[in-house]
Amino acid sequence: MIRRRALALGLALALAPLAGPVAEAHQQKIAISTIALNPRSGMVEIAHQVPVHDAEHALRVQGAKNPDIIGSAKSREDFAGYVTRRFLFQINGQVIEPAYVGSEITGGSLWVYQEAPAPAGSDPALLRFNSQILTDVWARQENRVNIGGGTNVATFIFKAGDAPRSAALTE
């Protein structure tokens, strides 16, 4: 019996250093948004990927009691509303409020989807955008915005208080 306890204690102590990175990994402090043109639908599609744990923490900071992104549609919708308010978007100088399409859980991430009509014409649309998702929760939050699709992607990184950036949206 003592031998088993000593073995279990030794194993626990040997694995303890590995627990540090796992414990810190819960709050990833990164969100990724992708803006792409869907030529089939004529829509500009926006997809935001946020770690579930970060989303739940943000809801707690906003006063939600026991948020559950995975098990509660209300928690998901509350956070999706937050995401849409913290992502600023313009097309060709006009402020756009993309329509909320929905959300889903994939792995450890909450995906929030939005779309807006693409401007008419053959010229590339000029986008202006700013992702401040979770920057009001963590000073070290980093948000990436990917513009385009396939092999033609430009990535922009935002932190708290950063100014909007611009890029052309091409197919």
Image (spheres, rainbow, N blue to C red):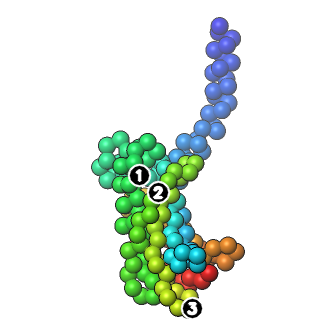
Q: Nearer the viewer, mark 1 or mark 3?
A: 3
Q: Residues within 10 Å of mark 1 (few under 14, many from 20)?
A: many
Residue 95 vertical placement versus 158 (above, below): below
Q: Which residue is mark 2?
A: 103
Residue 28 at x, y = what percent? 53, 53
Q: CA distance from mark 2 to mark 3?
A: 31 Å
Q: Residue furthest left?
A: 63
Q: Which residue: 49% across, 88% down? A: 120
Residue 122's label in the rendered image is: 3
Q: Residues within 10 Å of mark 3 (few under 14, many from 20)?
A: few
Left or right of residue 101: residue 23: right
Q: Which residue is mark 1?
A: 76
Residue 91 at x, y = what percent? 45, 83
Residue 43 at x, y = what percent? 51, 76
> In the image, what residue type sits under mark 2?
Ser
Q: Residue furthest front?
A: 40
